[in-house]
Each structure stands twice: as structure tokens, then as C-alpha cells.
Amino acid sequence: MSDMGGPIIEPDWLVPKIDQRMEWLVETGGIKVAKDGGAPFIFTFVDEGKSEMTLRERERWERTCDNCGVYTPDDGEFYTGYISRIVDDIQVLMAFGVCSNCKNNPMKGTEE
């Protein structure tokens, strides 16, 4: 058994983004659709980005920090993770990405 290093604490900047996205899932019926369809979970992103992105915009969006908005090129350090919540017996997994500065300073989390 390996030591996971203690509890994982969500950074202050991430919590309101999660809450906002969860509210959106409930308000738009995403939770209801999943529950009615028998889905055990929903996988989504903290931020979906614009609905009509070009391929180039989508590639840039995929490596843009969900906290500070800084783009990290392919040769830079970019980190991804996910959080989990349960709503009406549906597990919601929400992915996010952060630049190295926000990862290394999770409670501050802004690019200087």
C-alpha cells in the first residue's frame, strides 16, 4: 500500500468553478437525463470552451489553465486532474487543467 501524502484539498479558485458547473448541469437537465437513462456517471469539464471552436482554438483551449487562463505550449508543463461529486445518485467527474504556476501555488494560483 502506498502513501498518498494526505488528504487532497481543492484550491480555493476551483471550488466556485465546480459549483457553477454543477448548477449548470442541474439547471440544463444533464443530471436528469443521466439518471433517466440509467447512466452511473457523467464526465465533463470545468469549462467546455466555446461551442464552435476551430481545431486550432480547441488545441489551445485544451492547454489553457482553468485558473489563470494562461496557455501552455506542448513543450511546457501542463497538468490535468479531475474532481468527483455525487448529485441525485449520479457521480459527476469533472476534468480541469492547470499551468505549472497554479499547480505549484494551489491556494494562490495566479500567474505573476
Image (spheres, rainbow, N blue to C red):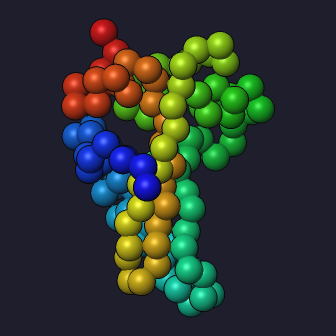
Q: Where residue 68 sits in the image (x, y, percent)?
A: 38, 25
Quarter location, residue 43:
bottom right
* Count of numbered circles in the view: 0
Relative to 19, is 45 on the left or the right?
right
Seen as rendered, the residue at the extreme top is: 112
Q: Where residue 34 sits in the image (x, y, percent)?
A: 56, 80
Q: Residue at x 68, y 34 (%)?
A: 58
Q: Would you place residue 52 above or below residue 82 in this image?
A: above
Q: From the image, which quarter does the C terminus lie in?
A: top left
Quarter location, residue 59:
top right
Seen as rendered, the residue at the extreme front is: 1
Q: Nearer the viewer, residue 14 or 81?
A: 81
Would residue 16 be visible to someone looking at this image? no
Q: Nearer the viewer, residue 108 or 68?
A: 108
Q: Would you place residue 54 above or below residue 5 in this image?
A: above
Q: Where residue 80 sits in the image (x, y, percent)?
A: 52, 38
Would residue 9 be visible to someone looking at this image? yes
Q: From the image, which quarter does the N terminus lie in?
A: bottom left
Q: Nearer the viewer, residue 89 or 60?
A: 89
Q: Where residue 102 sits in the image (x, y, percent)?
A: 36, 25
Seen as rendered, the residue at the extreme right is: 55
Q: Residue at x 58, y 14 (%)?
A: 76
